[in-house]
Amino acid sequence: MNRIPMTAQGAAKLEEELKHLRSVERPRIIQAIAEARELGDLKENAEYHAAREEQGFIEGRIKEIEHKLSMAQVIDVTKLPNTGKVIFGCTVVVLEEESGEEITYKLVGDDEADIKQNLISVHSPIARALIGKHIGDTIVFQAPAGERTYEILEVHHI
């Protein structure tokens, strides 16, 4: 059974979504189905069919989140000593050598990745190149736009 790496923040976000789906969305959709049933003939009742479709989506998402949480290996990087080595869950400041731009990335699980927030999947090419390296190391990796070279400036456990 393969565990799915997940940050403590990612697990908390999923648990919050699960709680919301169970305590708010599920009761709301059950009420909507009950109200639609009262309108009469279910075969031609668009509200009923829409509510049932939404119920299927909500129940599917609940099962998906429950599965992810059951398979999660939650790693709280704030509880690990910062040795300057890049590990899962840490925040890394790198210098892009060609442009001279400093970029900050956080290495997270696949489900948490969001490049717009600089949250990169631990399985991405850049993260694979960063893992295990230390402050001062230079990495070279293949990005969609071509080969990139970064120098690791800082490693934070936040």
Image (spheres, rainbow, N blue to C red):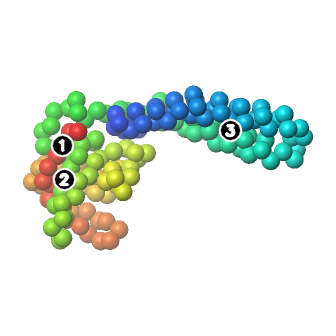
Residue type, label 3: Gln
Q: Nearer the viewer, mark 2 or mark 3?
A: 3
> What type is the residue that disc 1 sits on?
His
* 94, 85: nearer the viewer: 94
Kind of element beneath mark 3: helix
Residue 14 in the figure: left or right of residue 63: left
- Residue under label 3: 55
Residue at the spot 18% in from the left edge and 70% down from the top edge: 99
Label ID, residue 93: 2
The location of residue 79, given as percent across then percent down, is 22, 29
Report the front residue among 60 and 126: 60
Asked whether residue 120 appears in the rendered view, the answer is no
- Circle 1 or circle 3, nearest the eye: 3
Would residue 110 appear left or right of 28 to someone viewing this image?
left
Give how far apart the Cα atoms at labels 2 and 3 are: 43 Å
Q: Position of residue 81 (x, y in %)?
A: 16, 33
Q: Say what secondary structure mark 1 lies in.
A: strand
Q: Could you tell me how far apart the alpha carbons at marks 1 and 3 are, in whole angstroms?
A: 42 Å
* Mark 2 or 3, nearer chain start: 3
Identify the image quadrant of residue 38. top right
Q: Tag 3 or tag 1, which sits nearer the N-term?
A: 3
| Callout 2 touching callout 1 (CB < 8 Å) | yes
Three-letter amino acid code at disc 2?
Answer: Val
Disc with the residue nearer the chain's start (2 vs 1) = 2
Q: Residue furthest left?
A: 136
Q: The residue tagged with tag 2: helix, strand or loop? A: strand
Q: What residue is shown with label 1?
A: 156
